[in-house]
Amino acid sequence: SARQLSEDARRAYTVQRNVGQAFDLQLRAFGADPSDPDVAGDLAFLLLKVNPAQAETARQLSLHAIALRPSQRRAPLRNRLARRAVRG
């Protein structure tokens, strides 16, 4: 499932410090469920971590993630990351 792939990506990034693997897993998660705002937001974050960073794509994906949220109850860290990506 998209959520499981996203959790695997989070572990790859935080525990293994493997940005490439985390990005690949998160991209698969997004492919499985592009309407999940957490999955989209995490992919936007990783787009800024890959080499070379893909800032414009991350900004667009951040906007997509924000638009998917039905309310203002966003995770504080993701909120700050999304705002940073939007500002460029």
Image: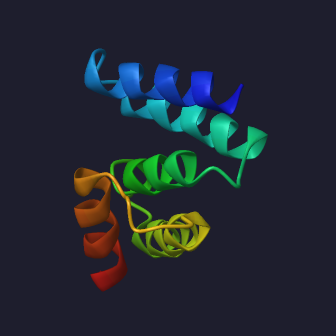
Question: In the figure, 58 relative to 34: above or below?
Answer: below
Vertical relation: 78 (above or below) 58 = above
Seen from the viewer's position, the closer of residues 34 and 59 is 34
Q: Could you tell me residue 60's position as x and y percent?
A: 53, 75
- Residue drawn where x is 48% and y is 24% of the image: 7
Would you say residue 51 is visible in this rendering? no
Foreground of the two, 47 or 82: 82
**Residue 13, picture quadrant:** top left
- Left or right of 44: which side holds 13? left
Instruction: Give the residue drawn at x 50%, y 75%.
Output: 63
Snapshot quadrant of residue 33: top right
Residue at 27% across, 25% down: 14
Left or right, residue 36 beside residue 59: right
| Residue 18: x %, y % from top left | 36, 24
Residue 74, position as x, y percentages in the image: 36, 58
The image position of residue 54, as x and y in percent, is 44, 64
Question: Which residue ends up furthest to the right in the rendered image?
Answer: 32
| Quarter of the picture holding the C terminus | bottom left
